[in-house]
Amino acid sequence: MSRYSRPLAVALLSASTLAYEILLVRVFGIEQFHHFAYMAIGVAMLGFGAAGTLLALVRPGPTAAERGFVAAALATPLALVASATLVHLIPLDATQLPWSLRPWLKLALVYLLLALPFAVGALAVLLALVLERERAGLVYGASFVGAGLGATLALSILWVALPWRALAVPAAAGAVGAATVAVARRGPAVVAIACAALALAALALIRPPWELRINPYKALPQVEAYPEARRVTERADPVGWVVAVEAAAFHHAPGLSLGYQGEFPPQSALFVDGDIAGATTDWSGQEDRRLLDWLPTATPYVLGEVESVLVVGAGGGTEVWNAVEHGARRVRAVELHGGIAELARESMAENAIPDAIDVRWVVADGRRYVSSAGERFDLVTLGPGRGFGASAAGVHALNEDYLHTVEAYRDYLGGLTEDGVLAISGWVTVPPRRSLRTILTVGEALRGVTAGEIGDRLVVVRSWATFTVLAKPSGFEPRAIEALTEWTRSRGFDLDWRPGIERPTPGFNLLDEPVLYEAAAAAVEGAEAAEAFEEDYPFTVGPVGDGRPYPHHYLRAGSLSLFFGAERGSVLPIAEWGYVALIATLAQSLVLAAVLLLGPVLLGGGATTGEGLGLVLAYFSAIGLGFMAAEIAAIQQLTLLLGHPVYAVASVLVVLLVFSGVGSMRSDRWSARHGWAAAAVLAVIMTIYAAGLLPLSRALQPAALPARGLVTVSVLAPLAFLMGTPFPLGLRGMARGAAERVAWAWAANGFASVVATPLAALIALEAGSRVLWLTAGLAYAGAALSYRAGRTTAATTARSRARA
Amino acid sequence: MMFLSRSPLFRLTVSALLLSACGVEAQERQGDPEQAERRRAMVEQIESYGVRDSATLAAMRAVPRHEFVPGRYRDRAYGDHPLPIGHGQTISQPYIVAYMTEILELEPGMKVLEIGTGSGYQAAVLAEIGCDVYTMEIFGALAESARERLGRLAYDSVEVRHGDGHYGWPEAAPFEAIIVTAAAGHIPPALVDQLEVGGRMVIPVGSVYGVQNLILVTKRDEGEVRTRNLLPVRFVPMLEGLR
């Protein structure tokens, strides 16, 4: 085998498994629900660690290791095709999981099938490490660089191919890896299997042996079941798979007044990943546009003339039409999702807006737009839709949303004209959650930009289905409030808060408790009262900041017991299951990792490895945890800088993996004696990043994209370079190249990385990204200490042996 | 014959025969004792969740839910969960059926409109209370099988129509109660119109597959409409247009 054929094969196999992971998250996110996709793939990743346990128990000699490497390399592309095919043959209905045991057996089978290619691919890399003990840095580096290229490949292919067709691409990359091994080995059987793998991958590319199977209870199949429903367009990019369905029966008008008696204009439903994402509407009929004035989002137009409007998260364009219909002359529609914006723009062109009205669509993050565009608006409005989080982009389903933080609301208020109004709408939930957080967040943002009382600057309107919070820093005029009161009464909407209100008034849409009034009263009273209100409420509904941008996360331990312990009238809302799925993923990963790692060690697997195995496991677990925590913290904070979750996920994955690879390769030239220093320096850098990266991201947000990209690379590259070094240094310095110890090290690192993913997500949710950086730093500090202790133990043992 | 029909003995015999037939019918509906026992346990559970209306609980105790689920799910018919019935539709969990029925404050003889027949279970519960039930289903196959099933189980006070629920059943309006068992994106104006003054409508509303809330709509004497959010639920969406 030539000097570089093995590292090359390792790079290609790593590329194939990482690309498979990214694409699998996309495909499962479409077919099932995102929470389930996250759980299934999160657990399946344990296959990486399982390869280490297997090797530690089998203890192959050099010849067997060589044969094993070739077999694993050849099996990887076959496993990739088999996994994707067989998983699609299991009729698993995730919605039945809470009700029956049977689907759990199917889920276990799904876990096994998903874990298979990761286990086989990891086995090949691990055996290469065992075979190349003197060049561990090169092999591990090749694995990193390959994974980085795999991430690039997966995200690139998603621009041009539908995700389930793209699922064949990793197998093709794996087959090329297998072919590399075959060329080096030149045995007839090996060549034949490699050719078969290439042919199979090519066949899967041309005609995938699997089909997209969307859960029948997702919105897309439900709407497509409407009479004469017709899919009019579909397009895919890494943010999501966008589908538009034309159906006469489909209606989308959030919170429409019960007093509306007119007809509905024709609409097309918009979907992202099979979930509803709004609608485009044929507003060409003058009569049809009457409907717009019966929507709660028309509220700000009752207060006075509105010349210029910024619509953040413009979706299918309803709010753009609302602005036009109510006399706006300049409208900016900002939408993060290019596919949705394109469809909305096409729909508007067909409906022909008069030339005199300046309407522009911008594909961007609304917050960045308002802080960098240099325009001011009479109205900044955010509709009831949700922003897209990194979950849509792929690997880390955290759902961070920087559009609804205190800092974001301050940015919007800063983008208003002197008498401008900020309007934020959302769906009413039972028990109320989002409405309360919006009121408290708007209150805090208002206090930050204006002096004095804010009671006359706040309005809260509620229909039977939605709420709208209005903020006007210059204060609402009494005449405007009179007009508003009359208009809301005519629509059957309630005014939960208005200037001068002294007590909650009986309304049209009854609540058990007047909590929206109470929240607004607390927000007006001040920060302390708002805090006290949140503490008394069973959900966490207080304002969130950029450091913990999870405005859609409301559960806390107390509220979980409220749901599960109370009478059956309280059912945990489906939207909150993400948190439960995260905890379930963590619990399952912990249990399986303990069984697959600690079980064999305790049962005697480590008996022959001598002293210090505990320190080896601690070191490699710590660097696994540190790496994943840093990766997730970086994705979260750089999403704010780059303004797009796909850019953040792509840049962090690629830069982190490629530069880690370079660092790993370079580490072969470093002495293992001071291996602890790399981990110690990383701990220091991460502590600095905990303090500085978020303010830097915020400060540079208005800069041009190339400048922000350059900053991203400059920030990440040195960090990544160092992050690539602890593993190979540890192999040389702590595991000392012994095959069994290398295997245990791999297993510990693999399991820790998988467990760290949901754990880091949980830390980010509960404590924020700064604490996540500190956690990563702490993990590396722990690794440095383990390394030193391990070296000391080894030296003491060696001295004792010498004396003996 | 004329004589015979006036004879008390004849009347007694016919009554006995009819009663006997009804008894057989009721027995057939009930299913085997094991199913009846499961049903009793299901109702006990529902009662423990807070449903108190005796008419609703009696109806739930009487309607053989296992007849309304596909054969392969029969052993799970009395668990408190929804089950698939085909066409991407589900039969609601028993608690929700009981909760929605109780909220309507029904009395025998009331005229009730149901939108979303599904397998016919909710309609059977309403009929068991003694209501005249008008139920509409968008899927032709489901409407047909529900009609056959309800007929076989002798729920004669139920009229099944294959039709579009968004426009209600104007010929039979107004209704003292309306129950919608499939989520709508908005509250259809036709249903508000067809609700009698003083009537109650219960409907799951929300974005098609986002947040859905069970909402009680009441029409006051002066025709003013009030709503109350009851609890979060997840239903199959209501379809419009025939299928």
Image (cartoon, coloured by chain):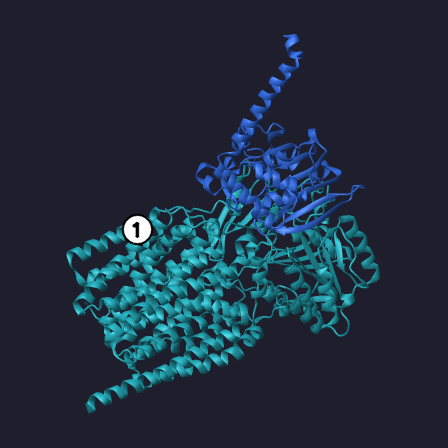
Chain colours: A cyan, B blue
* Total number of numbered discs in the rendering: 1
Residue ID at (54%, 64%): A400
| Few, some or many residues within 10 Å of mark 1 (<14, 14–19, 20+) | some
Could you tell me residue B77's position as x and y percent?
50, 41
Question: In the image, what residue occupies the spot 44% across and 70% down?
Answer: A631
Decide if residue A520 is on the left or right side of residue A187.
right
In the figure, is residue A381 to the left or right of A89?
Answer: right
Q: Secondary structure beneath disc 1?
A: helix
Q: Position of residue A281 (x, y in %)?
A: 62, 45
State the quadrant of the C terminus of chain A: bottom left
Residue at figure coordinates x 53%, y 30% from the top left: B27
Residue A26 locus on image (x, y percent): 44, 55
Q: Is residue A510 found left or right of A579 in the rendered image?
A: right
Residue beneath disc 1: A202
| Quadrant of the frame with the N terminus of chain A | bottom left
Q: Residue at x 67, y 38 (%)?
A: B178
Q: Is residue B98 above or below residue A477?
A: above
